[in-house]
Amino acid sequence: MAMCPECAESVADSDLFCENCGTDLRTRRGGTAQAEAVTDPCRRCGEPAPTAVTTTEAEAEYCPSCGLRRQDGTDRVETDLGAIGGVSDRGLVHTRNEDAMALGLRLPAGAAAVLCDGVSSVRSPELASRAATETALGVLLSDPGLRPEDGRAQPASRSAAVVGARLVRAAVAQAATAVAALGAPGDHDAPSCTLVCALLDYPDGAGADPVITVGWVGDSRAYWLAAPGAAEPAQRLTTDHSWATAMIDSGKLDEATALADRRAHAITRWLGQGGEPEPEVLSWRPEGPGVLLLCSDGLWNYLPGAEQLAAALPPPERGTSPVEVARLLTQIALDAGGRDNITVIVIPVPTPAEVRT
């Protein structure tokens, strides 16, 4: 007999909720929030890990002997839900992983993922990333209960796109509220972050192709990756909310000049104080198989093109799992220098059978 993932109470395969703690058994989730706290001594001086009884808030974050920022269990996070997987890595330069991810499955059919990249110029940006990912995923995995407002019959894919767009906008709005609560009004040093998320819905049933809805704020990206000549070619799905993009779109600078400017990667939308958390949203139904990839700039700074990323994937016939693909792409970024935090989420389409049965 199976067990509840929250309280370990025995549950039947047909149970929708745990009778002991109320956990929704129709969903599975993982990510940065599930990372285990590190209890190792300080990496620099050997100071023992703090205990909950004696630790102040400052000692929990920094070693009281040498001042080194303590590990919090997020330097390397791997999430393997079988059908989808992700890796978030601190990289080789930063002292803390300011990225966060949250992945989830909604049985019998459906998947969602959220990735956030903390804005390094403010304090504790990792808090924004973690709050936003968990909040947004909770909305995306909820029972939407939404239908087109006019009540008229519509194709299933169109209805799913409408519902998906509403859920994504609601997820981003609630994530923005959660991030805003981390700082006082007018506190421009409060935690903030970017966000990209994806929702896969199966309006025609578990065996059909999904409708994919993607939403984003900032410069974390989503890509569709497929083999050369595929019915749905490899392409970047998102457009960065950045200074360089704004200059190129306005015609003020050509692409080469804009990208060479020191302000190129400055973001123009974000979640947090002073940000514009309005997402861009797109929905579509792929015409063939491929991989939906979400990533932070720790990866795309090295492999910015969809064709480059697609070429880095192992051949489908190898049967490489999503989390293994995420590991491979993360290692490419580390081998290239790992100058930033790296987060990669891999969602094969169609998703493997365990999501659809």
Image (cartoon, rainbow, N blue to C red):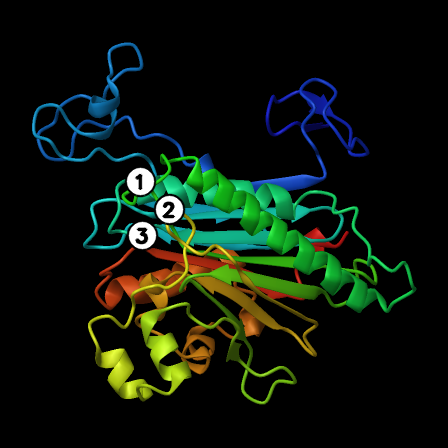
Mark 3 or mark 2, whichever is nearer to me = 2
Identify the residue at horizontal 54%, vertical 69% (top origin).
Answer: 318
Give the residue type that dot 3 points to: Val
Structural distance between the alpha carbons of marks 3 and 2: 11 Å
Q: Earlier in the sequence, mark 3 or mark 1?
A: 3
Q: Earlier in the sequence, mark 3 or mark 2?
A: 3
Q: Farthest residue toward the front?
A: 186
- Give the secondary structure at mark 1: loop
Give the residue type that dot 1 points to: Asp
- Quick check: 356 left or right of 241? right
Give the residue type that dot 2 points to: Gln
Q: Position of residue 84 (x, y in %)?
A: 57, 55
27 or 172: nearer the viewer: 172
* Circle on res. 119: 3
From what the image shows, is residue 181 above or below residue 103?
above
* Circle on res. 273: 2
Identify the residue at horizontal 25%, vertical 24% (top origin).
Answer: 60
Crowd tier of the residue under label 2, counting other residues whose Cα lies within 10 Å: few below 14, some 14–19, many 20 or above: many
- Reading the image, the residue beneath label 1 is 187
Mark 3 or mark 1, whichever is nearer to me = 1
- Give the secondary structure at mark 3: loop
Q: Earlier in the sequence, mark 1 or mark 2?
A: 1
Q: Position of residue 156 (x, y in %)?
A: 84, 65
- Give the secondary structure at mark 2: loop
- Quick check: 205 left or right of 29? right
* Circle on res. 234: none
Crowd tier of the residue under label 1, counting other residues whose Cα lies within 10 Å: few below 14, some 14–19, many 20 or above: few
